[in-house]
Amino acid sequence: MPFLGELAALCTAVLWSFTSIFFTSASRRIGSYWLNKIRLVLAVAFISTTLMLSTGRLLPDGIPVESFYYLIASGIVGLTLADSCLFRSFVVIGTRLTLLIFAISPIIAALFAWILLDERLGILAILGIMTTVSGVIWVTVERRHPNSRIDAINGKAKRIGVLLATGAATCQAIGLVLAKAGMGESLNPLPATFIRMVAAAVSIWLFGMLRGDLREIGIKFSDRKALLLALGGAICGPFLGVWMSLTAVKYTQTGVAMAIMATVPVLIIPLVVIFYKEKASLRAVIGAIVAVAGVTMLFLE
């Protein structure tokens, strides 16, 4: 199917836009740390059910051992570490600055894909990535949130937040490159997503057990509204969204896929207009047009 990878990346960005709405509301009730733990468990349940219904088994036969290594590492780096850094960065320096820094992830992905997978991008693809990232940055700089309060953050906290956001962008980029290496030519994205998600869930819950988090589990799971919001976010994000993201990197260059997936701050504009009654500024519209132009270049590449 032509443009399968690019279309999957666009679907990922749309799904992740809805995920941000669900997870923002849920994290206000139970905190981002517990939300991260719960969403991974829900995602594992959804993916395993889908695999059993569609294939009758969780994993196909004949997966190379090195594929397991790549995908397990991808899950821990790209899901556990990346999201933990991302969610913490939201708290420390706010959403706007975090997303601004996170916009560099397509460039990092393209660099690591070139180093590890020998993926080489054409001139049009490079221009498309840069144009898309520019549009996303233009929108993100303009988007101000009442909880950001960047000027009130002291220098040390700001440096930590910037490092966390940079770490999140780097870990997500490396995680997708490792996932592509793990899938190779034969492994389908859904079982690959299952392996990544199990690795991420086990690692974060094991870390929580070592911290003594289990005593809080009853309190967190008693908030039904938070669980429903987490459920909606898990379907759009770590289930369908991550599945589509692996489909994207399997069928197109990693940097191209990441650039299209990085358009979440642009795609979320109509959602915040609908759900939060915010008005879209002229700057946001212009940034969206620039990002769309960049994505169009990636489709034409």
Image (cartoon, rainbow, N blue to C red):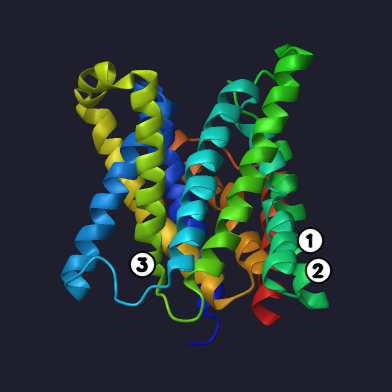
x then y, percent, for residue 131: 77, 61
Q: Nearer the viewer, residue 112 or 257?
A: 112
Q: Identify the residue at horizontal 53%, vertical 87% (top origin).
A: 2
Where's residue 96, x and y in %?
65, 33
Q: Residue furthest front?
A: 65
* Three-letter code, disc 2: Leu
Q: Do residues under tags 1 and 2 come within 8 Å of each other at their CB atoms? A: yes
| Most foreground residue, 252 or 26 | 252
Q: Is residue 265 left or right of residue 30?
A: right
Q: Residue at x 48, y 87 (%)?
A: 1
Which amino acid, by three-letter code, is at mark 1? Met
Q: Would you say 167 lies left or right of 131 here?
A: left
| Residue at the disc numbered 2 | 127
Q: Which of these two is toward me, 64 or 21?
A: 64
Sequence-wise first label, 1 or 3: 1
Q: Which of the two labelled residues, at mark 3 and mark 2, occupies the earlier sequence position?
A: 2
Please tell me whether residue 142 is drawn above or below residue 63 in the rendered image: above
Residue at position x 37%, y 27% from top?
208
Q: Would you name the residue on which mark 1 appears?
A: 130
> In front: mark 3 or mark 2?
3
Q: Secondary structure at mark 2?
A: helix
**In the rendered image, which quarter contains the C terminus?**
bottom right
Badge number at residue 37: none
The residue under label 3 is 190
